[in-house]
Structures are given as structure tokens and as C-alpha cells.
Amino acid sequence: MPVTAKLSRKFYETFGDEIANELVEWFNQVDTTYRTELREVNELNFARFDAKLEQRIAELRAELATLEGRLLARLGVVEGRFGTLEGRLVRWMFLFWVASLSTSIALIELRH
């Protein structure tokens, strides 16, 4: 929204309408020029900001992908350990079951 320059009545009386109007017109042209330049500078700065933001987002995504890969690798190690632990637990449960069954059979045989 352009701001129209206004001059006092005394200015008009001193320099005349033609010069005063010319000066007002010049002020308005300068204002329009500066507004246009400011808009262009703002658009350029926003484009730079947007490009940097996109670059940083891409860097973060790459870093997250790296972290995801490392996490999945560690999860694989943990799963392997759980698999080993599960196998050992099954062995111990089987041995316990065999020992309990053997004890129960021995006690039943002693009773008869």
C-alpha cells in the first residue's frame, strides 16, 4: 500500500503547485522503487533460506538413515544374543525336566 507524500500548504505557496507536485511525484516514485527493491531482496533472501533449509533437512535425513542402519545392526546383535540365550534356556529346561522325571520315576520305583 503506497504512502502518498504530502507537503504543507506553505510549501505549495512558497514554491508553487508545479514544483510541489513534481516533488511529491518524485517522492512517490522513490517510495515505489524502494518497495520493489525491498520485495525483491526479501524474495531472494527467502529463496536462500529455503535452499539452506532443504539442504539441512537432506543432511538430517542422511544422518537419520545412518543412525537407523547402526540401530538395526545393533538390534541384529541383540536378537542374536537372545537367540543364543533362548537356546541355552531350552537346554536347561530340558535338563531340568529330565532330572525331575528321573527323580519322580526313581521315587515311584522305590515305593513299589
Image (cartoon, rainbow, N blue to C red):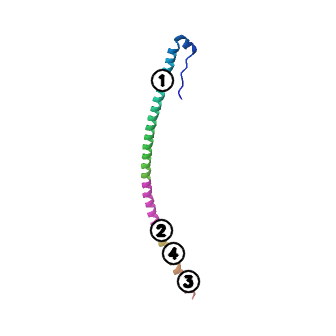
Magenta residues, start to end: 68-88
Query: Which callout, 1 or 2, points to the residue nearer the camera?
Result: 1
Residue 23 in magenta? no
Q: Nearer the viewer, mark 2 or mark 4?
A: 2
Q: Residue at x 49, y 25 (%)?
A: 31
Q: Report x, y in % for residue 13.
A: 55, 11
Q: Which class describes the residues within 10 Å of circle 4: few (<14), some (14-19), or many (20+)?
A: few
- Residue, disc 1: 29
What distance separates the C-alpha of mark 1 from that of mark 3?
A: 112 Å
Q: Which residue is depicted at the point 45% across and 42% down?
A: 53
Q: Is residue 64 above or below residue 75?
A: above
Of badges 3 and 2, nearer the viewer stands 2
- Mark 1 against mark 4, which lies toward the viewer? 1
Q: Quadrant of residue 73?
A: bottom left
Cβ–Cβ under 8 Å for marks 3 and 4: no
Q: Which residue is mark 2?
A: 86
Residue lying at the far bottom of the rendered structure: 112
Indicate which disc, 1 or 3, sits on the residue closer to the N terminus: 1
The disc, 1 or 4, on the residue closer to the chain's N-terminal end is: 1
x and y, in percent, of residue 45 in the image: 45, 35
Q: Please report whichever mark, 3 or 2, sits nearer to the chain's N-terminal start.
A: 2
Packing grade of label 1 (10 A; few <14, some 14-19, many >=20) is some
Q: Quadrant of the C terminus?
A: bottom right
Q: Secondary structure at mark 2?
A: helix
Q: Nearer the viewer, residue 18 or 30?
A: 18
Residue where numbered disc 4 is placed: 96
Alpha-carbon distance for marks 3 and 4?
Answer: 16 Å
SS type, badge 3: helix
